[in-house]
Amino acid sequence: MATHKSAIKRIRSNEKKAEINKYQHKTTRTAIQKLRETTNKKEASKLFLYVSSLIDKLSKKNIIHKNKAANLKSKLNKHVNTL
């Protein structure tokens, strides 16, 4: 267990940040799943813009790797274009 005051604060802030990151990641995964289930082209293209911005935000904050973000966006774009 940490004994320094700053180390205790750091542990507390890390737990808060991990909770926020987990929430954002889960929200994005749910949105991706919703996009993959969509069959309407117009609705899917609108949803794709929202999902791609979420993915970009996760990538920017290093919650997911930038290559994974690019891979996800590419596959989702391909899915939307085939509708």
Image (cartoon, rainbow, N blue to C red):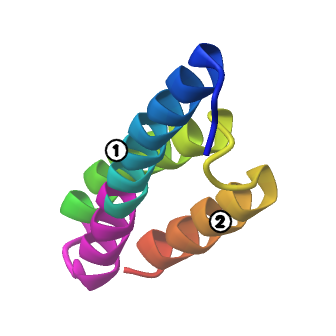
Q: Amino acid at mark 1?
A: Tyr
Quarter placement of the C terminus: bottom left
Q: Is residue 38 left or right of residue 45?
A: left
Please, is residue 60 above or below residue 70 in the view? above
Q: Is residue 41 visible?
A: yes
Q: Quick one: SS at disc 2?
A: helix
Residue found 62% across the figure and 34% down from its top: 61
Above or below for 24 versus 26: above
Q: Which residue sits at x=51%, y=70%?
A: 76
Say which residue appears at 63% left-offset and 29% top-offset.
3
Percent position (x, y) of residue 7?
Answer: 64, 25
Q: Which one is in front, 44 or 34?
A: 34
**Residue furthest right in the image:** 67
Q: Position of residue 73 (x, y in %)?
A: 59, 60
Q: CA distance from mark 1 to mark 2?
A: 14 Å
In this view of the protein, which residue sits in the foreground, 19 or 2? 2
Number of numbered discs overlaid on the protein picture: 2
Label 2: which residue?
Answer: 74
Q: Measured from the top left, where is residue 29 in percent x and y?
A: 38, 67
Of callouts 1 and 2, the N-terminal one: 1
In the picture, measured across the screen, residue 7 lies left or right of residue 33, that is right
Q: Main secondary structure of the magenta part?
A: helix
Q: Any magenta on residue 10?
A: no
Please tell me which residue is depicted at 52% across the width and 49% down the height of the picture. Answer: 55
Q: Quadrant of residue 16?
A: top left
Q: Which residue, given by chain and number where applicable, does mark 1 sit on? A: 50
Location of residue 20 with respect to 48 vertically, above or below: above
- Is residue 48 something one can see in this rendering? no
Q: Which residues are the magenta region?
A: 27-41
Q: Is residue 15 left or right of residue 71?
A: left
